[in-house]
Image (cartoon, grey):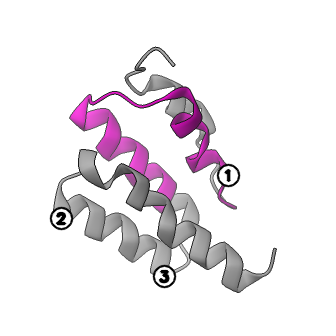
Amino acid sequence: MDQHELAQQAYALPGGFADRLDPADLADVRECAQAGEWGEENDLLLACLRHTRRPVTAAERQEPASLPGAISTGRAEELSADGT
């Protein structure tokens, strides 16, 4: 996967959670993605999702860890599970 594909993946990632994020938070997460700050994007996305306490599927909890620079993979386990 090249840089362009990684950037597209990073920018698309928060879209799957858009219905559970405040629009300003979504914009901040996407700004990190556009800047290539994938680790920061991951941390911010997980923090925003934890704050909402809205359910996240097991598969969704794995998505942030798929980004390069996503070193906070253990934090995804703290998200509210929906039982799937």
**Amino acid type assigned to the residue bearing label 1 in the image:** Ser
Give the residue number, with chain letter if any, for mark 2. Answer: 24
Viewer-proximal residue among 39 and 77: 77
What segment carries the magenta color? 41-68
In the rendered image, which residue does mark 3 sit on? 35
Whole-Å distance between the Cαs marked 1 and 3?
17 Å
User: Which residue is depicted at the point 47% across and 61% down?
Assistant: 41
Q: Nearer the viewer, residue 6 or 19?
A: 19
Mark 1 nearby-residue class (10 Å; few <14, some 14–19, many ≥20)? some
Between 81 and 40, the one lying in front of the other is 81
Residue 4 lies left or right of residue 79; in this view the side is right
Q: Position of residue 40 (x, y in %)?
A: 48, 61
Give the alpha-carbon distance from disc 2 to disc 3, as whole Å: 17 Å
Q: Position of residue 14 (x, y in %)?
A: 42, 59
x then y, percent, for residue 50: 33, 34
What label sits on residue 66 in the rendered view?
A: 1
Q: Secondary structure at mark 2?
A: helix
When the figure is inspected, residue 82 is found, relative to residue 39, above or below; the finding is: above
Q: Of the residues under marks 2 and 1, which one precedes in the sequence?
A: 2
Residue at disc 3, secondary structure: loop
